[in-house]
């Protein structure tokens, strides 16, 4: 019955039984010498064939559905579904069940893969978070123990160690604040207000606010003009986009080479404005590029922690831009520098 539907099997059975009945009726009439009733064999064949079709179709359908229902009951239990079986007896039932089972199997494989990836990500996240918190906590513990063991009696030592402890507390506070922000973003609970604003204003203000940090690292900040005009109106949440620019520029300063520069550029891109933050820093290896926007992922772990930061900056940047309906990309040459690019909708 492979490749056939219950309907086609019932039709074939009805035709076969009908033909046999018609032949048997004709032979019986001829053997008894009955003439003039030529219509009786086809009529009896059609009647018996129809009854046979109905019985086979009904019984075969009930039999198959009863057996198939067991398979679907197992699938529904595993999927947690309460949907009913809806089989079309005019189709090939075996093929129909095979398709459904294969679809269920593929979904199960996909769910298992996602669960494994999620579990791996969870383990990495907990490990990274513990490492990020462990360093400042151990530092604070060391400073306090030093003060308790006699350092408090020396005004110069106690002030210096208290300042160091305060710096580590600030680092922890920044980490927890960034965690809170990214958690709200991923849950969709961060309010984004899209309003027109002048992009040039926030570019200049952000770069001016980071000028001192750049000078301390001997990095020159540059703004490269790519569109004519004193104003560039775009649509977005200005305060959130300041955070995007700040994170990208700070990142370029932290990973920059002494004597290098960070250049912020903007270009016309039809109905959008393309913004780029390019540096002449250490660059990113090609193998690291797909993961740079993951939480706590650091391309140079030793240098990253020396430079500070929570390790969440690029992840926050990605979520803010996605909430604006935009994306961010990165291109880099290891040892020469990196360029982060994103677009903003024109107002």
Image (cartoon, rainbow, N blue to C red):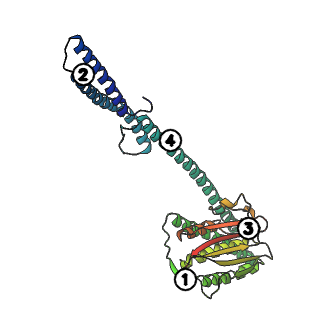
Distance between the Cα atoms at labels 2 and 1? Answer: 91 Å
Residue 105 has which mark?
4
Q: Which residue is mark 3?
A: 306
Picture quadrant of residue 275: bottom right
> In the structure shown, which secondary structural element does the residue marked by tag 2 occupy?
helix
> Which residue is drawn at the image coordinates 74% and 70% (left, top)?
255
Note whether residue 323 is visible.
Answer: yes
Q: Position of residue 11 (x, y in %)?
A: 33, 30
Nearer to me, 147 or 293: 293
Find the residue positioned furthest to the front.
36
Residues at circles 1 and 4 in contact by the CB criterion of under 8 Å: no
First along the sequence among labels 2 and 3: 2
Q: Which residue is mark 2?
A: 41
> Which residue is drawn at the image coordinates 79% and 66% (left, top)?
335
Distance between the Cα atoms at labels 1 and 4? Answer: 51 Å
> In the structure shown, which secondary structural element does the residue marked by tag 3 occupy?
helix
Q: Is residue 293 left or right of residue 187?
A: right
Q: Position of residue 71 (x, y in %)?
A: 41, 35
Q: Nearer the viewer, mark 3 or mark 4?
A: 4
Residues at circles 2 and 1 in contact by the CB criterion of under 8 Å: no
Q: Quadrant of the N terminus?
A: top left
> Which residue is drawn at the image coordinates 71% and 75% (left, top)?
158
Q: Position of residue 10 (x, y in %)?
A: 34, 30
Q: Which residue is mark 1?
A: 197
Distance between the Cα atoms at labels 3 and 4? Answer: 48 Å
């Amino acid at each position: 019955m492979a490749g056939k539907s219950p309907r086609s099997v019932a039709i074939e059975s009805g035709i076969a039984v009908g033909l046999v009945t018609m032949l048997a009726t004709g032979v019986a009439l001829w053997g008894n010498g009955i003439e003039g009733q030529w219509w009786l064999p086809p009529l009896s064949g059609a009647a018996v064939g129809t009854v046979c079709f109905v019985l086979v179709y009904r019984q075969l359908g009930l039999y198959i559905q009863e057996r198939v229902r067991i398979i679907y009951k197992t699938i529904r239990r595993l999927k947690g579904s309460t949907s009913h079986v809806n089989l079309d007896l005019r189709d090939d039932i075996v093929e129909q069940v095979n398709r459904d089972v294969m679809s269920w199997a593929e979904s199960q494989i996909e769910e298992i893969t996602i669960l494994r990836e999620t579990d791996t990500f969870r383990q990495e996240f907990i490990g990274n978070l513990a490492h990020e918190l462990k360093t400042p906590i151990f530092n604070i513990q060391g400073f306090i123990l030093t003060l308790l063991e006699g350092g408090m009696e020396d005004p110069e030592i106690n002030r210096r160690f208290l300042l160091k402890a305060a710096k580590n507390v600030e680092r922890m506070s920044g980490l927890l604040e960034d965690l809170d922000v990214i958690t709200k973003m991923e849950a969709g609970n961060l309010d984004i207000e899209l309003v027109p604003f002048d992009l040039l204003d926030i570019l200049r203000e952000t770069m001016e606010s980071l000028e001192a940090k750049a000078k301390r690292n001997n990095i020159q900040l540059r703004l490269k003009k790519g569109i004519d005009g004193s104003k560039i109106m775009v649509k977005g949440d200005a305060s959130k986009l300041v955070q995007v620019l700040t994170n990208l520029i700070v990142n370029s300063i932290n990973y920059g080479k002494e004597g290098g520069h960070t250049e912020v550029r903007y270009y016309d891109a039809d109905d959008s404005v393309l913004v780029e933050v390019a540096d002449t820093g250490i660059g990113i290896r090609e193998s690291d590029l797909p993961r740079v926007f993951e939480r706590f992922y650091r391309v140079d772990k030793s240098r990253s922690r020396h430079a500070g930061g929570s390790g969440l900056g690029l992840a926050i940047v990605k979520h803010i831009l996605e909430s604006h309906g935009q994306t961010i990309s990165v291109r880099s040459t290891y040892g020469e520098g990196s360029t982060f690019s994103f677009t903003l909708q024109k107002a």
